[in-house]
Amino acid sequence: MDYEVSGLKKLVIYYSFEGNTKLIAETIADTLQADVLQLIPKKEIQSKGFMKYFWGGKQVMMKKKPELYPLDKAPQDYDVIFIGTPVWAWTFAPPIYTLFETTEIADKKVALFSCNRGQNGKTFENMKKELYKSDIIGQIEFFDPLTNNKEENIQKAAAWAESIIKAI
Ligand SMILES: Cc1cc2nc3c(=O)[nH]c(=O)nc-3n(C[C@H](O)[C@H](O)[C@H](O)COP(=O)(O)O)c2cc1C
């Protein structure tokens, strides 16, 4: 099936700190020929070591909304939006919170994806609360796909993306 011919405008929005969510986002975008909007905080966590958990966890706890570089795509221009996040402290990462606070996402078909280390917590539940003006049409999680069964996870992401579009 040629997804361009389906006439739907598709956007993949994501934040990724260590590349897992980026891998899945790019797989979905390649599969569907969708546009991509990467959220990039102006100030990123400096530590890739154990301190990252304290820094990131604290950001979540304090409901921080880190300032992002200007978005180069407008979600309102699209019909179907995929939103991907790493799981931080059992919920979505702070840059996604900034997105929700600063950008209207209404009357869209939205599919959610997350990358985690086995504890998705309230990630999807909390995203759905923020996206109450849209229709949530799917959700899926991946266990650190860069370092665990990478090829399988790429296949899983591609198949899921196709199934979402076919079901519309
Ligand atoms: C600050 C921080 C908090 C995290 N909290 C969780 C968590 O609550 N549950 C979980 O399963 N994984 C947690 N992780 C692991 C990441 O969700 C996981 O490694 C994910 O694949 C990273 O995605 P990324 O490479 O796109 O940043 C946490 C990682 C960080 C840095």
Image (cartoon, helix red, strand yellow):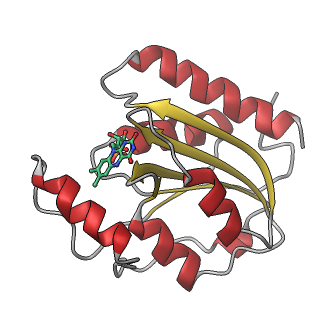
* Side (left or right) of 135 relative to 103: right
* Vertical position of residue 68 compared to residue 16: above or below: below
* Vertical position of residue 144 compared to residue 115: above or below: above
Camera-nearest residue between 58 and 94? 58
Q: Position of residue 168 (x, y in %)?
A: 90, 44
Q: Position of residue 129 (x, y in %)?
A: 69, 67
At 55% from the left edge and 53% from the top edge, which residue is drawn? 123
Q: Position of residue 69 (x, y in %)?
A: 35, 77
At 82% from the left edge and 53% from the top edge, which residue is drawn? 8
* Vertical position of residue 67 compared to residue 51: above or below: below
* Side (left or right) of 58 relative to 153: left
* Side (left or right) of 140 relative to 88: right
Would you say residue 35 is visible in this rendering? no
Looking at the rendering, the quadrant in which ligand 1 lies is top left
Q: Position of residue 30 (x, y in %)?
A: 57, 37
**How many numbered discs?**
0
At 49% from the left edge and 32% from the top edge, which residue is drawn? 142
Camera-nearest residue between 123 and 166? 123
